Structures are given as C-alpha cells and as structure tokens.
Image (cartoon, rainbow, N blue to C red):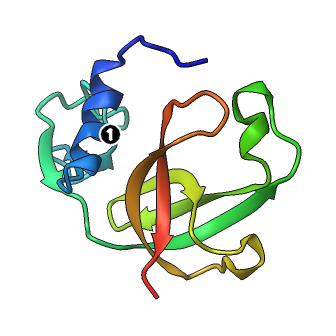
C-alpha cells in the first residue's frame, strides 16, 4: 500500500535529501528546525531561512525494532536512530549495517529510501565508515 498524499514541507525536505541538498530551517535567534515549520516554536519568529544540513551527523541514541506496527511490518527488524546534525536532530532508520553494530557516537550520512511494507519514503542513515 503506497500513500499518494503529498505533505509539501516534509516531502520537499525528502526531495532535497534525495537530490543531495538537505537543509534545515534557522530562525533569527539561531534555533534550527526541520521542515515543515512556519515559525520558531521557541520564539515565535517567522523569518526562517534555509541552511545547508551538515554532511554527516552523529548517532545520539538508537533502538532496534523487532515487532513493528502495520506500516513497517515487513521492514522488521530495523534500527531507528536519532542523529545530531549540529543545529538539528533527525530521526530515521539506520541501513547498510548489522543492527548489533550501530553505536552511540557513530558517524552517519543522511539519505532517503522506501519501506518494504508500504513503499513510502523514509529518512535513512548510512555509516560513513
């Protein structure tokens, strides 16, 4: 099952990642956010500017999912990680590495792939080695 509804802000971000031009949004106060955002939720500032996402990030935390919900049932087991890319943290699946080999502090790059279950696009991370 593939969903054909487009979420403009989020899908624009995924498009940019696929094109090798990932970005985040920065407020005048210097806070970083992922799209879609129309304002900085901390300050209410509305003049958000697109900034280039750093090329690599660092795994802050991760977990392996063995029993998944219906939208990811065919993908299990998989690793979900929160990765710090400097001003922003991004959540996604870690790919191309054995789940037991994912480590806190590991350097990764961001990408986009499809789920096995629905064919929807998801954010993924690849170890930089």
Residue holding disc 1: 14
Q: Quadrant of residue 105?
A: bottom right
Q: Residue furthest top?
A: 5
Establish if 105 lies above or below 96: below
Q: Residue furthest bottom?
A: 129
Q: Quadrant of residue 27?
A: top left
Q: Quadrant of the N terminus?
A: top right
Tell me residue 66's x, y (percent): 86, 51
Tell me residue 24's x, y (percent): 25, 48
Tell me residue 86's x, y (percent): 34, 68
Left or right for 62, reference 23: right
Q: Residues within 10 Å of mark 1 (few under 14, many from 20)?
A: many
Q: Residue at x 88, y 43 (%)?
A: 67
Left or right for 94, reference 31: right
Residue 36 seen in this snapshot: no
For this rendering, which residue is in front, 95 or 106? 95
Q: Residue at x 13, y 45 (%)?
A: 50
Left or right for 100, reference 60: right
Establish if 69 lies above or below 100: above
Tell me residue 43's x, y (percent): 29, 35
Q: Quadrant of residue 48?
A: top left
Establish if 54 lies above or below 68: below
Establish if 37 lies above or below 85: above
Residue 89 seen in this snapshot: yes
For this rendering, which residue is in front, 110 or 76? 76
Tally the marks: 1
Q: Residue at x 45, y 56 (%)?
A: 89
SS state under label 1: helix
């Amino acid at each position: 099952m593939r969903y054909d509804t487009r979420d403009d802000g989020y899908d624009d971000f995924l498009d940019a990642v696929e094109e090798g031009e990932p970005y985040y949004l920065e407020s005048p106060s210097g806070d970083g956010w992922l799209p879609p955002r129309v304002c900085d939720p901390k300050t209410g500032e509305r003049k958000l500017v697109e900034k280039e996402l750093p090329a690599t990030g660092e795994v802050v935390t991760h977990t392996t999912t063995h029993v998944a919900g219906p939208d990811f049932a065919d993908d299990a087991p998989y690793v979900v990680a929160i990765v710090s890319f400097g001003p922003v943290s991004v959540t996604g699946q870690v790919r191309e590495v054995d789940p037991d080999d994912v480590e806190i502090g590991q350097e990764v790059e961001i990408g986009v792939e499809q789920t096995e279950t629905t064919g929807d696009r998801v954010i993924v991370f690849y170890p930089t080695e």
